[in-house]
Amino acid sequence: MDLVAEGWGWRHAGRSTWAVRDLSLTIGSGERVLLLGSSGSGKSTLLHAFAGVLGGSEEGDESGRLLVGGKHPTRRHGHVGLVMQDPESQVVLARVGDDVAFGCENLGVPPDEIWGRVHASLADVGLDVPLDHSTSALSGGEKQRLAIAGALAMRAEVLLLDEPTANLDPVGVREVRETIARVVDDRRTTLVVVEHRVDVWADLVDRVLVLAPDGGLLADGTPAEVFGAHRDELLRAGVWVPGVPLPDAIAGSASTSPMLSTRGLSIGYSPRHPVREGLEVVIPEATSTVITGPNGAGKTTLALTLAGLLPPLAGEVDAAELLRPPADVRVGMLRRRRRVQPAHPHTWASRDLLARIGTVFQEPEHQFVAATVADEIAVGLRALGWEPGRIATRVDALLETLHLTSLSTTNPFTLSGGEKRRLSVGTVLATAPRVIVLDEPTFGQDRNTWIDLVGLVRQMLGEGRSVVSVTHDRAYIETLAQHHIPLAVARD
Amino acid sequence: MTDQAPILRRRTQLDRTNPTTRLLLAVVLSVPLIITLDWVSASVAVAAEFLAFLACGYAPWFLVRRLIPLLVIAPLGAINMALYGQAGGRTWWQWGPVHVSDNSLLLALALFIRVFALALPAIILFSTVDPTDMADGLAQVLRLPPRFVLGTLAGIRMIALFADDWRTLGHARRARGLEDVGRFRRWATMSFALLVFALRRGTRLATAMEARGFGASGADVPARTWARPSHMGWPDVIALAVAVTIGVLAVLAAVWQGTFWPVWR
């Protein structure tokens, strides 16, 4: 089934600028296309439009025409499968079989035919679990394959993938890529993929389309042609053009004096289910440490415990002498006194963490608390009791470093992915903690943000801070692992 | 992340009934307990219900464990009833509005048992029903609109994600130096963030459902089919008959013992 755009454009309701404009293209039946463009060039909008889920005239204005197999996309539901970035919000039902059957039911497929299709689709994506297996118990990669199975069960002839591997660990990425390769092997299924990480898909696709930021197409050709002719534009747009070198690995080896160390540490959320036990790790001073391991190995849990946010289930996290807060601090206004043990970060007052251990969360939005970007950076400084003048100077300097000056009055929730990431790092840099913990800092980021982040980490190390990163990202590990804590699969 | 392994539970005779039957069962079983306030009917009901659940194949300890929270709630109600319930018979203790009498003690006992008699079926019937099966029944047997039923079902699944979000939001507030002061302000920002997350996830879920043909309308859209047909059958008739029998037995026992105490008296 072919996809056609004829002078097509879309403007979301309430916006003055067009998300996509003057776009004309034809994607033939069975073709495999990688769709690129800078953030805001309308890649997702185009995919959603082809999937017929952009909504009606109350959701936005449309110009030109868009056709799927000669018909308007909203009349092709079921012929087009859409897989999006976030695995969590695509699972509809609680049991694997029911979830795959969901699309067939909506299309009015007779019940006795549905289950045959469900079995066949699950086999096609290699999900070898019972039909009543809980969908919540699937990994991210398995959830994405479940979504693909749902589309296959509908007999979709077009697969649209919107950053399908951005939220996955390397194992999940491989699973999804191999599944798609198998599915499109028949050369009948039309495939359109949007993804920053070009290397995952480059050798599977026949054609690369690049959307121009101001409308229309910037490039259209085979991968080799497009990456050769438009290298610089693509790099500017944050695309991971294959074969372009990244910043050099950081020099120097780990320092020998520990900032944090653990003794017989058990981590987890409930004493009955420790995620890991008996951990003996060290976070050296002024060194970049990376924590790696498969999903479920307890990387984030360890990072939160080291950062003093999660109490250890057993054992201790010890802070170095120079990191410790004063012994007797009053915590809280309600005369609630927590017993502060200077050696153990999880007993510290929240305010005492600010200048000592900072944490950047995996989802930047989890840590946003203010209405503007500038305020967001100032929050920690106010909690430390800085004077307004001094705060303003510090905030301005940081906005400059993070390239966020022009956005200082914007609401943090409305920033782009890369801007959110930079701001979340900035909120931590503001109070200059000696130890900085980063949880999957490069997850789903484009190349430009990636380079910015690595630069920021170098700067932190140059200032003598310890940086602890939880990561799956091979390039990041190669660049920044002075000290490596590998966590293997924990239990079972 | 929250442990979300599927709960493995032995299938019971009750699982052979249609989930919507449970709604009816809960109503039927509560009627005798609502019309009479005495302790005999409540005791008969609770005993019969317990036996019925055992007969269905529930393990005794499973039932007992689910009733533990009631050991806190029931005495609270009973103590109130003992102190302030309608006075009658011998007076044991009087102090201001407090009047403990034979009558109020009897009412307290009845209330204590009635809490169990009412809660036992409600807790067991609804805590052991599969939400997907219930949705199938609501849409196919009770003919509620599929858009509403399936939308709600998909939404319920996201609640587990909110718990994880809330915990992370709390950690983030601590990391940002906001944990020590202004608890209400902190909760406000956390609630706002949670709402943003919920809306965003909800929108994405709705898009994913729409892409799979959910909620489409138009002349060329075929009627929705159901991969899991949901019917009423003999097991449902039997279950209802058992429930009615329990209710009738309870009331008859009270009348026979002379303790029948209708609410209108």
Image: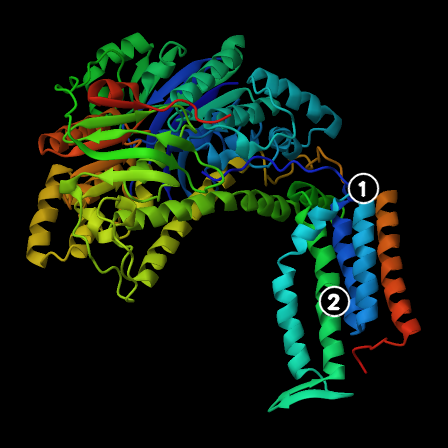
Where B141 sits versus B37, above or below?
Answer: above
Q: Secondary structure at mark 2?
A: helix
In the drawing, does residue B265 fall left or right of residue A292?
A: right
State the residue position of label 2.
B114
Can residue B251 be spotted in the picture?
yes
State the residue position of label 1.
B13
Depth order, front residue of A94/A225: A94
Nearer-N-terminus badge (1/2): 1
Q: Residue at x 56, y 35 (%)?
A: B5
Q: Residue at x 65, y 61 (%)?
A: B70
In the drawing, does residue A379 fall left or right of residue A215?
A: left
Q: Residues within 10 Å of mark 1 (few under 14, many from 20)?
A: some
Label 1 is found on which chain of the structure?
Answer: B
- Residue A45 found in image quarter: top left
Q: Residue at x 64, y 18 (%)?
A: A120
- Residue A310 found in image quarter: top left
Depth order, front residue of A348/B35: A348
User: Which residue sits furthest bottom?
Assistant: B96
Image spot of residue A114 (x, y percent): 69, 26
Q: What residue type is disc 2 on?
A: Arg
Can residue A57 be spotted in the picture?
no
Q: Residues within 10 Å of mark 2 (few under 14, many from 20)?
A: many
Image spot of residue A345 (x, y percent): 26, 44
- The Cα atoms of the two marked residues, 1 and 2, are separated by 25 Å
Image spot of residue A438 (x, y percent): 26, 34
Depth order, front residue of A411/A313: A313
